Amino acid sequence: MLATSACRRMMAVAIFAISVLNLLAQARHPSVEQQFASLQRLEAMHPDSIGPKYQQAVLLLGFVCSQPDDSKAQQYIDEALRVIQRIEAMTIVKDTERSDLATLQGFYYTALIVTNPRQNGPRYYRQAIDHFDEAMRLNPHNELAQMLMKKFKEGMNGNS
């Protein structure tokens, strides 16, 4: 009986320790929703800036591309499209900002393809490539566009 009681106490302590460690891990690694909410607050402080909107879309689309089977993937794609549309509604003069917008558009089509390659690959392949090409034409130093184009082509060649 003493062994059972001691075993229960040890289990309770272990469960408590695991719970605390889990909470600490969550605090160090905020969820996509928490990160998105922070970027929305930043956007509210700087409504005329493309930066916070750009970061929101990159966060959402990056998550979708890394976890396309997640139950929230379509929700994140839809939200990213709304963010991209808010950027499209802005007056964009700088080539670097137009390049960033084209990058997001290409990334959006990439996310659509990644979530359903068979159906969306043939449908959106050209749009993704064209937007990445435009992004690099507008700003040859756009590292995200370069990296996404490279990964996109690698992914498409890997699925051939």
Image (cartoon, rainbow, N blue to C red):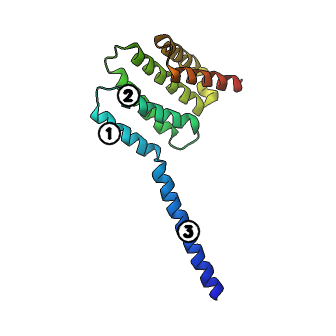
Residue at the (41%, 28%) spot, across then down: 54
Q: Do the CB atoms of the residues marked 2 and 1 lie less than 8 Å apart?
A: no
Residue at the (53%, 17%) spot, across then down: 132
> Looking at the picture, how far across and down is residue 68, in whole percent?
57, 37
Within 10 Å of the Cα at label 2, are there few (<14), some (14-19), or many (20+) other Cα atoms? some
Is 130 situated above or below 160?
above
Location of residue 98 by image quarter: top left
Q: Do the CB atoms of the residues marked 3 and 2 lie less than 8 Å apart?
A: no
Residue located beneath label 2 in the image = 51
Residue at the (54%, 66%) spot, across then down: 17
Q: Does label 3 or label 1 sit earlier along the sequence?
A: 3
- Residue type, numbered disc 2: Gly
Q: Nearer the viewer, residue 69 or 136?
A: 136
Q: Which mark is residue 110?
A: none
- Residue type, numbered disc 3: Ile
**Which quadrant holds the N terminus?**
bottom right
What SS does tag 1 mark?
helix
